[in-house]
Amino acid sequence: MNKNRIYQKSLKDLNTFSIDVIAKKIIFVRTIQSLIKIYKKCNLFNIPYIILGEGSNVLFLENYKGIVIINRIKGITVKEKKHSWLLHVFSGEKWHDLVKYTLRMGFFGLENLALIPGCLGSAAIQNIGAYGLEFKNICQYVDIICLENAKIIRIEKKLCKFSYRDSIFKYKYKEKYAILAVGIKILKKWNPIIFTSLLKNINISKINPYRIYNNICKIRKKKLPNLNKLGNAGSFFKNPVISKKDAKQILSLYSNIPYYSQINGYIKISAAWLIEKYNFNNIQIGDAAIYKKQKLILVNLKKANPRDILKLAKIIQKSILKKFKIWLEPEIEFINSLGKIKLLNKKNNF
């Protein structure tokens, strides 16, 4: 019996933006051997392909002419060390499922990243982060596989070039490679990562991993749109990281803007605050709109056309640039009929 399921249907339920486009084929892959076999077929017949997990950080712009490979290669192994737990997790595992698994096992440290959509592969690519914790803080290595010769290559953390919503995997290992697994290190000695909104709801003397997990789930459910009701890809734009000089200038005009000092001396400021401050007055293009409870999220109200979403994003970019002299860079990736492309940046606007 074929372990892979093959479809010729809409991708609507396979991307969190709920964009109703179709692909030549959609194949769910559960083994490394199957992934390599499909790649070789695509390579032989010159068929475009793209590998997705939950489709949580992408915007399809049109029908896809190739094969969409849905990664469902799963598995978790655990090694116990004196002071830590070492997890080897395959890239098809859902991130939130991993967080729940570690809590059940009594491994504490991932709870601040609860309810982030997507799989382990995208967690590494995007260097996901929330509430004071980023993927790079717990990552030891990322295993990639060369689809041409099935060779597995281990990329140690220091070579992954993790930064804010970025990694080497966005640039160097895109063609002929796939993320296979990640290594995660969780210290046995638990040190809670405290953030302001947490202290509003929990007495600091009663903080434990489960309370933090439950609190973050409540915050995210209240703050973020329900994917079953409003299609979205999470934060559409990155929080801009600017120089101290530029930050000083904008803070002299807007002293209440949220900002965060970075290790490299730069300043990260809140993109949601910039959009909120501009006051777009419930702007809507077709069925594309800004989410009222979190301005950094663009939503598909029902049957949004991807071009409407792009148009809305461009209006936001131009407006913020004009008012604050700051360019908002997209966090999501764009996919046209042949694959991922660059859009909505200064050098290559649409």
Image (cartoon, helix red, strand yellow):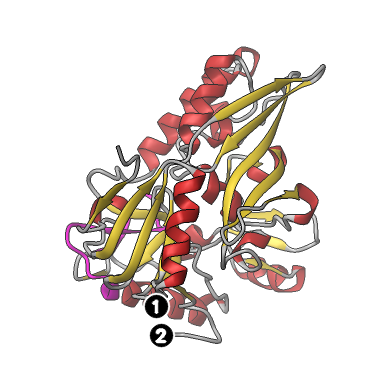
The local secondary structure at tag 2 comes to loop
Quadrant of the rendering where the C terminus is positioned: bottom left
Q: Which residue position is annotated with label 2? A: 350
Q: Residue at x 76, y 19 (%)?
A: 189
- Residues rendered magenta in the picture: 288-309
At label 1, counting other C-alpha atoms closer than 10 Å, the crowd grade (few under 14, some 14-19, many 20 or more) is some
Measure how far apart labels 1 and 2 are at the Cα level.
9 Å
Q: Position of residue 211 (x, y in %)?
A: 53, 19
Residues at badges 1 and 2 in contact (C-beta under 8 Å)?
yes
Q: Which residue position is annotated with label 1? A: 314
What amino acid does circle 2 point to? Phe
Task: Say if 5 sits above or below 248 in the image.
Answer: above
Q: Foreground residue, 77 or 305?
A: 77
Q: Position of residue 184 (x, y in %)?
A: 67, 35
Magenta-span inclusion, residue 308: yes
Which quadrant of the figure has residue 59? bottom left
Q: Foreground residue, 75 or 297?
A: 75
| Mark closer to the chain start, 1 or 2 | 1
Q: Residue at x 63, y 60 (%)?
A: 169
